[in-house]
Image: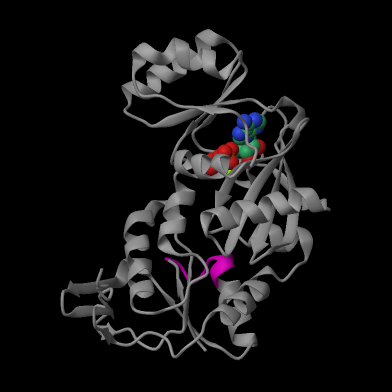
Amino acid sequence: MKFAILSRNTRLYSTRRLVEAARQRGHSVRVLDPLRCYMRIGKDGFALHYKGQSLAGYGAVIPRIGASINRYGNAVLHQFELMGCHTPNPSAAIAAARDKLRCHQLLAVQGIDMPVTVFGDNPDDTDDLLAMLGPPPHVIKLTEGSQGRGVMLTEKPSASRGVVDALRGLYATFLLQEYIAEAGGADIRCLVVGDRVVAAMRRQAPDGDFRANLHRGGVAEAFDLDPGAAEVAVRAARVLGLGVAGVDLILSARGPLVLEVNASPGLEGIERSTGVDVAGLIVEFVAAGATGGGMKSRTRVRRRARTKD
Ligand SMILES: Nc1ncnc2c1ncn2[C@@H]1O[C@H](COP(=O)(O)OP(=O)(O)O)[C@@H](O)[C@H]1O
Ligand SMILES: [Mg+2]
């Protein structure tokens, strides 16, 4: 099968590992910079080009779309989908996962537990909003933050109000959550591939911080996940429509809570700490899901057949 990996940088660990895993399994694979993909969209059909050439014949595309190119990268991925290319993570699912508000709404309605979360827009509502959340400490997060950036802890109501006012002044969108103190600055990253957790690691925040992100100096070790928590992670990925996901759980007194679902999880920390060939499992899962001959160089727009009533 011919694989495309949408990634900005061939030297990144995760990209390199996916290329290696695909080649080891006899697939041909090419890394495409999503920002060099461009397209023609018309009533008569689609065309997708890369550095002057038409893209065709890809059976599957593995998106590795980071936060910084989310919108354009997702439009490119959508084009691959419209042209009949299989992907484990559709563009609509990636968009939902990136937006913390939307993600929390979708998970909560399916009965998946998470830290209690509030959000609001108007400064006049701040006092009632904080009352809906309950007493501090509170965790305040930018809705489109990542790698622990834009995640803050406030210990007093006046601090919560101050941060909320400051963020509003900057026109930032954010949410507020109950602080899960009993997690002790640790969270669990579960790598979901299809319908199972293939690897899990526990990340511990460094002294003096409550954020366990590896980018913030957190340290990781393999973690033996119990079946109940694994099921929560798999359900969270499924609710969002992601075949491959990094689901972050925080272990609270009332059970595992979903913190976030990452559609382009990094592979370095999880492979190194667990020794699992996650890239290989992803490639096998994607290859098994792809059927048919792959995308054509130019695709006619398919219209939905009209039904007579
Ligand atoms: N409600 C919370 N209670 C306790 N710790 C939290 C809470 N929310 C986040 N954290 C800690 O902060 C880290 C970053 O939060 P997260 O929501 O994953 O944002 P990001 O997208 O920036 O990684 C988490 O990995 C966790 O360690
Ligand atoms: Mg996180």
**Outermost residue, front direction?**
309
Q: Quadrant of ligand 1?
A: top right
Residue 93 pos. (x, y %): 46, 57
Highlighted range, magenta: 8-15
**Outermost residue, left direction?**
43
Way the structure is coloured: one colour
Q: Nearer the viewer, residue 130 or 13?
A: 130
Q: Is residue 53 left or right of residue 123?
A: left
Q: Is residue 289 left or right of residue 308?
A: right
- Quarter of the picture containing the C terminus is bottom left
In the rendered image, the vertical position of residue 109 relative to residue 223, given as above or below: above
The total of numbered circles placed on residues is: 0
Q: Which SS does the magenta portion mostly show? A: loop
Tell me the residue at 46%/76% (across/down).
Answer: 86
Tell me the residue at 61%/15% (across/down).
Answer: 136
In the rendered image, the vertical position of residue 72 relative to residue 119, given as above or below: below
Q: Is residue 210 visible?
A: no
Q: Residue 170, located in which quarter of the rendered image?
A: top left
Q: Nearer the viewer, residue 44 or 5?
A: 44
In the rendered image, the vertical position of residue 117 relative to residue 261, given as above or below: above
Residue 60 pos. (x, y %): 48, 79
Tell me the residue at 25%/75% (across/down).
Answer: 303
Residue 228 pos. (x, y %): 78, 49
Q: Residue 242, located in which quarter of the rendered image?
A: bottom right
Residue 165 among magenta residues: no
Residue 183 pos. (x, y %): 74, 32
Residue 13 among magenta residues: yes
Q: Is residue 164 visible?
A: yes
Q: Nearer the viewer, residue 261 or 34?
A: 261
In the rendered image, the vertical position of residue 190 relative to residue 8, given as above or below: above
Q: Is residue 134 left or right of residue 275?
A: left
